[in-house]
Amino acid sequence: MALFDRTSAAVEARQLVKRYGVVTAVDGVSFQAMRGEVFGFLGANGAGKTTTLRMLCGLLKPTSGTALIDGIDIVADPLAAKARLGYLDEEPFIHPHLTGREFLDFVADLYRMPRGRQREERMERLLNLFDLAQKDGELIGGYSHGMRQKIGLASLLIREPSVLLLDEPTNGLDPRSARLVKDLLEELAARGTTVLLSTHILEVAQALCRRVAIIDRGRIVAIGSMEELRVQAGSAGANLEDLFLKLTAGPESREMIERLLESGS
Amino acid sequence: MSEPAALSVIVLAELTALRNRLAKRSRVRLALIAIALVVAAVVIGGTAFTIGATVGRFLAYSVDPLLAAGFTGVSLLMLVVGFPTVIASFFVGRDLLQLIVAPVRTRDIFIARLVSAMSANLLISGILVAAVLGVGVGAGAPSVYFPLAVVLIAIEILTITSLQAILMSLILRWVPARMARDVAAAVAGLTGAGLYLAWNLSIRQTFGQKGRPDLSGLTGFAQHIDWLPTTWPGHALSALLAGSNGVAIAWLAASLALAAILMAMAAILYEQTLPSGLGIFGGTSVVWRRRTQRQAASRLARGAGSPALAIARKDWLGFRRDVRRLTRLLPALLLPIGYAVVLSQPGRTLSGFWSNVALLTFLSMFMASALATPSIPSERRGFQLLRMAPLTMWQLLRAKVLIALPAVLATMLVFSVAVAVASKSGPLQLLELLAFGVWLAGGFVSISVSGGAIDPRFEATDDRRSVGLVGSLASIGGSLGFALLSIGALALFVLGGQAAEGTAALGPIPQGPAIGTLIALAGVVLLAVGCGLVVLLMWIANSRLRSFEASIAAT
């Protein structure tokens, strides 16, 4: 039985707007992700997913609107909000001249985690979980993309944040590691961690997320559970891929391919 | 339909990229850069022109050795300072990977890249252009002298750039590719520092004594290097000034032939080494393994982790393992050691306390600039990690100052003792020097860290390119201002002390403890202004870091 309140919002975006000069990257995005929920954030390339996530984690300041983490405004009280969340970029932020263990130690100190046996044991477990223990002693700069992704995830999990914002976390992972991450996220959510997951891989979103938001050209075009999305799109029985394509409708790809091949011949 | 030539396609793409980079910048920023460049051109170019005109007018008998020395000096400067640009243009950049897999001849890539490779050398040669034109004006040269001077300088730039490309290609043949760039940078840096040291000591010898400057040492030195090909354009111009047109044409032809040979050699060697060069410079990967598996110290430690200590430890480990950063530090370390060694030689003693103060100020500024300025930009993408942590940017700035300070302080303290002993200063003067060194180190390190934070280039792969123009100007300008205020304050303290004792040369102003205190108070005001300058720059740096929003490319 869950010992946390699933009805309280752990992440809340209220009318978030981000403008770069005349370009509006995010245009009034609002949603809530509840405690212990895996919430999917889907959109095409350049739709505004990463910009939204970066506003939520405090890397970007919203032009207008509010981003709340556990009810704390990240702009008004950034230190308190940041202490509660972990953000994994699609290209993880790492220090290439540290070993995996040193990097985890660095992050733990940065977040003022108490030193001692407990922290060391947790670090050891994480390194083993992600198959990085045998790479101990090798600098992160020499890691493959997948290994960087794994050390990035480990650096979040070492300090047990209550909110995880993950931008394409399974990007570059082998099938076994991708499965591990999916299982881990489910388990974390069951224990009360809120996971906001931005991904292109719709199967991952369909398998993991209780609810999803679809963003297109900076605006949320649909939000809800699979059933709710089917109703919004008017497509009973459709899978997430069909719904996504319908809700972010552009020219049919088949039609475009035909046109391209015709122009080439 | 005609196919576009590869060379023009590459050059056009580079020009478009340059235009886009400029268009992306704000107009205010561009205007500031343009103003700074114009001011620098007027000041530096004007000084060089005046010196040239003076030499042409009053030192006609020494024009040939001085022109030869000028061409050689600027060539060496280009060789050292322009080397990173040449390496970056010929061997760095993922766009080169694209060119190498495309059906493009390496020779075309070489010629296309030569244009950007020459950019730094072109800028440096501005000093030579101004000086050489000044010589022409001073000596009343015939009109053909001026275009010929420009042509000869262009040939010199081509020669030096080709030589740099050859050097890098040769280094790549003998040194493992992974280390080649660092070896090249270390050699260039050490050569530069050595040349600066030699030049500085030579200037001290030439202008050190009271009365007329003694140029015999300088011209004697120029005669020793007369055989160097870098002197040939100088000989051509001096021959023209002397009316020997035939000799001038011969030197011009020799310079042209040398440039052509070196360029051809560079192109051939580049063809052979580009793939191996790109193997490392196109995409870096660091593989390193610790010899022993040491358990992290944190197992034994207790209490909450400290972000400042964590950053310090991370920086220390990164610095120790990053050969590139270590090689950048070598020249900075060579200067104080070199000065201390040279000045401890008999007959090389400094002329007194103020000479020690000037040297200490310069070296402190140089060390702080080398160590502290890139400390925040060198975080690269890791800076985002710090921004996401529950850590204020003010804490980060403080941590970076505290990390760089001990190294600068230690070097300065050792150096202060060395010069004080070499110049036979008393214990009181040594104490004054030490206190002044501590003050300067604190100020310069804070200013340098701030300069880096004001205009960081987190995506730069090289520390020397990690601070933008605004940051560099803030750092240099702030340091110079702080140096002037500090030296001024020290002078006022010394003068106040003398006035209190009644030994100061104040003219009609009466001396005594009251006047002495007043003068010392003026010194305190200068110190306070210096502190204000440091606080102002740190405040700007803090604001800039807090509002930093640009995305940082994966590097």
Image (tube, rainbow, N blue to C red):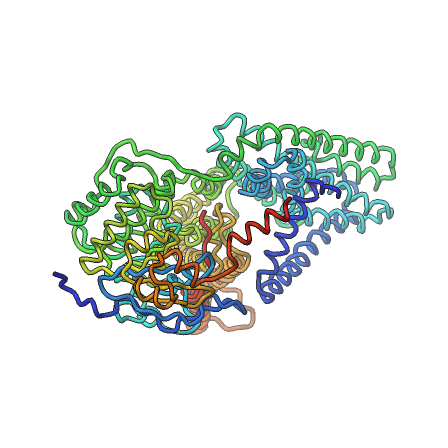
Residue B318: image location, x then y, percent: 36, 44
Q: Residue furthest front?
A: A236
Above or below: residue B507 compared with residue B3:
below
Q: Nearer the viewer, residue A224 or B182?
A: A224
Q: Residue at x 33, y 59 (%)?
A: A237
B263 left or right of A247?
right
Whether residue B375 appears in this view of the structure is: yes
Whether residue B216 appears in this view of the structure is: no
Q: Quadrant of residue B151?
A: top right
Residue B13: image location, x then y, percent: 64, 48
Above or below: residue B13 compared with residue B541:
above
Count of all numbered marks drawn on residues in the image:
0
Q: Nearer the viewer, residue A16 or A101?
A: A16
B203 left or right of B410?
right
**Image quarter hosting the N terminus of chain B:** top right
Q: Residue furthest top?
A: B174
Q: Quadrant of residue B171?
A: top right
